[in-house]
Image (spheres, rainbow, N blue to C red):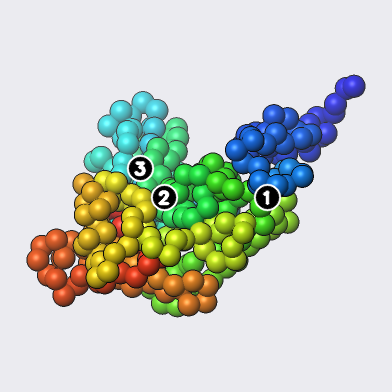
Amino acid sequence: MKMTAMSCLRVFPVVVLLAAAGCSGPETASLPESAVIPGSDADPRPSPTPQSWFGGENVYRVGPGDVLKVTVYGEEDLSGLFRISPEGTISWSWVGEVRAAGQTETEILEELRGILTRDYIRQPRVDLSIAEYQSQVVYFFGNVRHPGIRRLGENRSLLANFLQTGGPKVWGNSQIGILRTKPGGGDQDQISIALQSLMGGEKDILLQDQDIITVSAPEAASAFTGDDRVYVLGAVNGPGSFRWVEQMTALDALLEAGGLADYASGNRARLVRGQGEEKREIQVRLQDILEGDRSQNQGLLPGDLLIVPESWF
C-alpha cells in the first residue's frame, strides 16, 4: 500500500513516542514480565499517544551554566563554545559581553548576527546551537526506575522526561505529583496527574526548573516512600534512600550520601517534607553546616527528601 507524504506525517509522532517507551512497534506495546503487576490478567500499561501539553509553549530559554556553540564562518576568533555567566551573558571574544539568558536559540542567533552586521561584518554567516543544557533541572522521585536529577532540554514535556527515566518500577493506577515553587521563592503549586492519563495522551504538562516529581506506587494513594527512610538526591556523591534513625539530621543524611559533590551548591539545599497538601520545603544551608554552623543542622523525619542543587561556577 502506498502512503502519501501527509499520511507519513500523521503516523510519525506515534512511532516516535512508542519507540521512546521501549515498544516493539506502532500497534502493540510489549511489556517486560518484571513490569507486570502480579495477579493482573491484562497488560496494565497503555500505549502513549501524542497530545498537546498544558502550561504554554514548549520552548527552551537558556540560562546561566548553559553552553552555546557559535560558528561564524571565516572568523575563527568568534567561533567556539561559550558558557553563559551567572550574570546571564557570554563573553564573545573581542566583541565583548552579549546578553543571552532568558532567550531562545533563534533570538540569540538574531542578536549575534545583528551585532556583527551593525558593527563589524557586512553579511556574516552565523550558526548557533546549545551544546550543554545545565541551567534547568527537575527531580524524579518514588516509583521511578531511575530516580534523581534530570536536566531539562529542548523538550520539557513531563511524558518525554518521564520516559527517559525508564518509566515506573511498577505499572498500574499510579499518581504523579508535581511540587512547583513559584518564581521568587514564594508559594508552591501542587499538581496531580494520573499515570494512565499521562501515558494515554489525555494530559501532559510542561515541566519547569526545580520541579519535584513524585510517582506513587499503584497500591498506594500517597507518595512512594517508606515509613523509616529518608532520601537524598542531586549533587551528592551517593544519592539514594537511607534508613531513618532517631535524632537523624541533615548532616547525617548528607554523610550517608557520601557528602557534597564537587559541583554542589550546598547552601541552596532544600528539604521537602510531608504529603499532598501538607507538603512543604525548608531551606538547609549544608555548606554552612559543614563549616561548623550546627544551628543550621535541620532534624529529619521519616519520608523527608533532601535535594542538593548544582552550581557550575
Left-right relation of 254 to 9: left
Residue for point 33% across, 55% down: 242
In the displayed structure, 305 sits above or below 132; it is: below
- The amino acid at mark 1 is Met
Task: Point out the residue furthest to the top here.
Answer: 1
Residue 39 position (above or below residue 182): above
Pick whichever of labels 3 and 2 is earlier in the sequence. Answer: 3
Q: Which residue is mark 1?
A: 199
Q: Which mark is residue 148?
A: 2
Tag in front: 1 or 3: 1
Residue 89 appearing in the image: no
Q: Amino acid at mark 2?
A: Gly
* Three-letter code for the amino acid on which mark 3 is drawn: Val
Q: Earlier in the sequence, mark 1 or mark 3?
A: 3
Work out which residue is located at the far left of the displayed protein and give it: 292
Q: Which SS class for mark 1?
A: helix
State the image coordinates of residue 160 (x, y, percent, origin top left). 58, 46
Q: What residue is disc 3 on?
A: 67
Q: Nearer the viewer, residue 124 or 297?
A: 297
Q: Give left or right: position of 276 versus 72.
A: right
The correct choice, above or below, for 79 with respect to 300 in the image is: above
Q: Please name the residue shown 50% across and 44% down the image.
A: 145
